[in-house]
C-alpha cells in the first residue's frame, strides 16, 4: 500500500519542497516505521512548549490523513484494456482481476513492457516503470482529485490521444531522463503540474485547457513534438516555482519547435532561469510576467525567447547566449536591469519607438538588433 499525502508542519518534515507547503511522495510502502519516526519527531518538537494536547490532536489528524489517503497498488499484465481483468494486487500475478480498490483508490502500475488500451475509469495515479504501447480509449477521470502520473527513469511513455477529464495531472518525478508524451483531447481543468522529467506535447491540449486551467512548473522540461500554440490554455495562470527548460533535442521532442503561451505568469518571488533546450525556434510568453526576475539561457542565439505586453517583474533580465525579443515597447519594466552575456537583444519591428531599461549591461559578443525600425534606447 502506498501513501501519498501533503504534510505541512512548520517545515519540520520535508521530502520534496513546494511553494506554500511540503509535499511528501512515498513511492515505496511507508510502513509503520516512517509513521513512528514522524510521530516522535513531532512530539519532540512540541513537548518542550507544553503543547501535549495539541500534539495528541494533530497526531490524531495525521493518523486519519494517512488512512484517508491509503491506496491500492494494481499491477498490469502485458496486454489488454485497462477496464478489463488484466490486473493483480500481487506483483507476481496472476493478472486476471479487475482494477481493485480494496485498500483505497487504485494506482495503476505498469512494470513490464506491453500494450494497453485506455478506458473510462478513475485511478488515483499511474506509474510507468516500463514503456507501454498505448491505444487511446474512453476518458480517464480522477473523481475530482489529483492524479499523479509517474514515469520511471529512462522510460519514454506516449499516451497518444488518451483523454483525461475533470482534474489535474501532477508528477512525483525525481530524475530527468524520463518523458511523458501527451496529445489532444485532454479536457481536465484542475491544472497540470510538472515536477521533473520531460512533457512532450503532441497537441495543444496536452496540459489541459478547460476554463480556469493552470500550469505549475516545479522543474523539468516542456517540449513539443511540433510547434505548439498554447494560447489561452491556462486562464488560471502559469506559476513558475523553479528553473526549467523549454524545448529539447531529445526525441520525441522536435528540436526546432516553437512554443507559445499567452496567459499571465507568476515567477513566485524569485529569479527563475529558463533554459532554451532546442536548436532553434521562438518561445513566446506574451502574458504579463510578474513577481521575480528572469534569466534566459541558451547554447545558441538561434533560440529566441519573446516577451510581450506590459510586464511587471522587477528582478531584472539576464540573457546568456540566447536571443531576447521584445514583442512590445513596454515588454521590459523601465526600472529593471538588462544584462546580455554573448546574447542578442532584438526589439519589435514597428516603425519607431522607445525602449527603456534601468541599466543595460553588455558583455563581449553581444548584439542589440533594432531590425528595420528607428529606435531610441
Image (tube, rainbow, N blue to C red):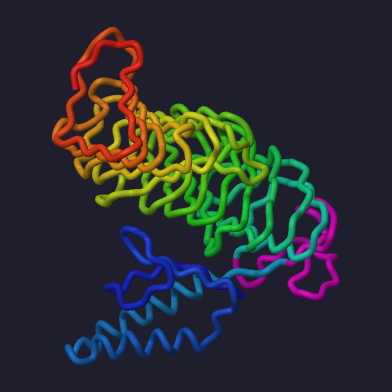
Q: In what quadrant of the picture does the N terminus appear?
A: bottom right
Name the residue: 44% across, 79% down: 63
The image shows residue 106 at horizontal and vertical percentages of 64, 63
Measuring 40% from the left and 29% from the top, which residue is drawn there? 262
**Does 184 appear above or below 24?**
above
Please tell me how many numbered marks the rendered image carries: 0
Residue at 49% x, 40% y is 189
Q: In x, y percent, where is residue 107? A: 64, 63
Task: Let me know if residue 98 is in the magenta part.
Answer: yes
In which quadrant of the rendered image does the C terminus lie? top left
Is 99 or 237 nearer to us in this picture?
A: 237
Task: Indicate whether 49 appears above or below 114.
Answer: below
Farthest residue, direction front? 364
Verify whether residue 283 appears in magenta.
Answer: no
Quadrant assignment, res 212: top left
- Give 101 or 299, whichever is nearer the viewer: 299
> Could you tell me residue 143's position as x and y percent?
56, 51
> Can you give x and y, in whole percent of width and height, for residue 134 in the image?
76, 47
Taking the image as shown, residue 262 lies to the left or right of residue 87, namely left
Would residue 59 appear left or right of 174 to someone viewing this image? left
Question: Is residue 92 shown above or below 247?
Answer: below
Foreground: 1 or 338? 338
Q: Residue furthest top?
A: 351
Q: Which residues are magenta?
A: 75-104
**Residue for point 81% across, 75% down:** 92
Q: Main secondary structure of the magenta part?
A: loop
Vertically, is 298 above or below 87?
above
Amino acid at each position: 500500500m502506498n501513501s501519498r499525502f501533503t504534510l505541512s508542519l512548520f517545515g519540520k518534515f520535508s521530502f520534496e519542497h513546494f511553494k506554500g507547503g511540503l509535499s511528501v511522495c512515498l513511492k515505496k510502502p511507508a510502513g509503520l516505521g516512517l509513521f513512528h519516526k514522524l510521530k516522535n519527531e513531532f512530539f519532540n518538537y512540541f513537548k518542550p512548549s507544553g503543547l501535549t494536547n495539541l500534539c495528541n490532536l494533530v497526531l490524531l489528524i495525521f493518523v486519519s490523513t494517512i488512512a484517508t489517503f491509503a491506496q491500492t497498488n494494481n499491477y498490469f499484465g502485458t496486454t489488454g484494456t485497462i477496464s478489463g481483468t488484466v490486473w493483480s494486487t500481487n506483483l507476481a500475478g496472476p493478472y486476471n482481476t479487475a482494477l481493485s480498490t480494496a485498500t483505497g483508490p487504485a494506482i495503476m502500475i505498469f512494470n513490464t513492457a506491453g500494450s494497453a488500451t485506455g478506458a473510462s475509469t478513475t485511478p488515483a495515479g499511474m506509474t510507468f516503470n516500463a514503456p507501454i504501447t498505448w491505444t487511446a480509449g474512453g476518458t480517464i477521470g480522477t473523481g475530482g482529485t489529483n492524479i499523479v502520473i509517474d514515469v520511471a527513469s529512462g522510460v519514454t511513455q506516449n499516451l497518444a490521444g488518451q483523454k483525461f477529464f475533470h482534474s489535474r495531472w501532477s508528477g512525483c518525478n525525481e530524475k530527468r531522463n524520463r518523458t511523458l508524451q501527451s496529445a489532444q483531447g485532454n479536457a481536465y481543468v484542475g491544472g497540470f503540474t510538472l515536477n521533473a522529467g520531460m512533457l512532450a506535447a503532441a497537441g495543444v491540449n496536452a496540459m489541459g485547457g478547460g476554463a480556469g486551467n493552470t500550469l505549475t512548473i516545479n522543474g523539468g522540461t516542456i517540449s513539443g513534438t511540433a510547434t505548439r500554440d498554447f494560447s489561452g490554455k491556462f486562464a488560471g495562470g502559469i506559476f513558475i516555482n523553479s528553473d526549467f527548460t523549454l524545448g529539447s533535442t531529445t526525441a520525441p521532442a522536435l528540436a526546432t519547435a516553437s512554443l507559445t503561451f499567452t496567459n499571465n505568469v507568476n515567477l513566485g518571488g524569485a529569479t527563475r532561469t529558463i533554459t532554451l533546450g532546442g536548436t532553434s525556434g521562438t518561445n513566446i510568453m506574451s502574458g504579463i510576467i510578474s513577481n521575480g526576475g528572469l534569466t534566459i539561457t541558451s547554447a545558441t542565439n538561434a533560440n529566441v525567447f519573446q516577451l510581450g505586453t506590459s510586464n511587471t517583474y522587477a528582478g531584472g533580465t539576464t540573457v546568456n547566449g540566447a536571443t531576447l525579443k521584445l514583442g512590445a515597447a513596454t515588454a521590459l519594466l523601465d526600472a529593471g536591469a538588462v544584462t546580455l552575456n554573448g546574447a542578442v537583444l532584438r526589439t519589435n519591428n514597428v516603425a519607431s519607438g522607445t525602449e527603456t531599461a534601468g541599466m543595460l549591461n553588455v558583455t563581449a559578443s553581444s548584439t542589440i538588433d533594432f531590425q528595420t525600425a528607428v529606435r531610441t534606447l
